[in-house]
Amino acid sequence: QPILWLAMAFSGISSETEGKRPGYEAVISRLMDVLFIMVMRSWIDQHQTGEGGWLGALYDPNIGKVLHAIHGRPDYHWTLERLAQIAMMSRSTFVERFTSMVSEPPMKYLTRWRVQLATTWLGDDDTITLEQIAHRLGYSSSFAFSKTFKRFIGVSPNHFRQMGKLDDSSISALTVTG
């Protein structure tokens, strides 16, 4: 059945590209979304629970709950104990499983997620202050946030912002040491 969906999506994209009727870009965009979803479903179907890295972790019944919690509330003062409770595991079992699936310990992942959000906000919104970002991410002060940001990205948040909107090659050139 996935093959049928893929064939239909490719046929639709081809038809829209050739016809160039009004709104064809929007139709192609939606069909590409469908293609992406179908490819991801196929990938997930071919991996058992507990396999497949971060995406597999997202669909794991225990670790997935933790990832959803972290992503939904980056400002919350997460502890290993609280995350293990969400996963319904002991702390040691949770840390071991999370680390094996996501390739880094839970608290490091949380910090990396917060820093990733900060890079987006710093690049997209010149009006947001470091204090506001720190608050949105659950840091007690802009100093604590700035120190963590610099440890992960290699430059201070202010310097990052001054660099302007970065293209992918500039971002990859930054040292992420975490």
Image: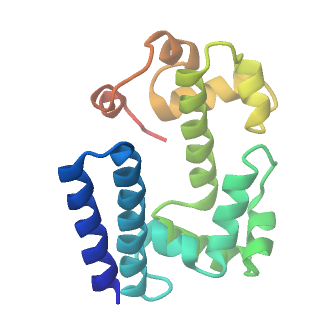
- Residue visible at 76% across and 20% down in the picture: 131
Of the pair 30 and 98, the residue shown nearer to us: 30
Q: Is residue 59 above or below residue 139?
A: below
**Residue 64, image quadrant:** bottom right
Q: Left of 4 or right of it: where is 64? A: right
Q: Left of 17 or right of it: where is 9? A: right
Q: Is residue 100 visible to us here? A: no
Q: Left of 134 or right of it: where is 108? A: left
Of the pair 59 and 19, the residue shown nearer to us: 19
Q: Position of residue 155 (x, y in %)?
A: 47, 20
Q: Position of residue 144 (x, y in %)?
A: 71, 27
Q: Is residue 142 above or below residue 175?
A: above
Q: Position of residue 128 (x, y in %)?
A: 70, 18
**Residue 154, image quadrant:** top left
Of the pair 43 and 97, the residue shown nearer to us: 43
Location of the N terminus by quadrant is bottom left
Q: Is residue 142 visible to us here? A: yes
- Residue visible at 71% across and 16% down in the picture: 129
Q: Left of 73 or right of it: where is 30? A: left
Residue that lies at the very extreme toward the top in this rendered image: 162
Q: Position of residue 124 (x, y in %)?
A: 56, 23
- Residue visible at 39% across and 85% down in the picture: 47
Q: Is residue 87 above or below residue 69?
A: below
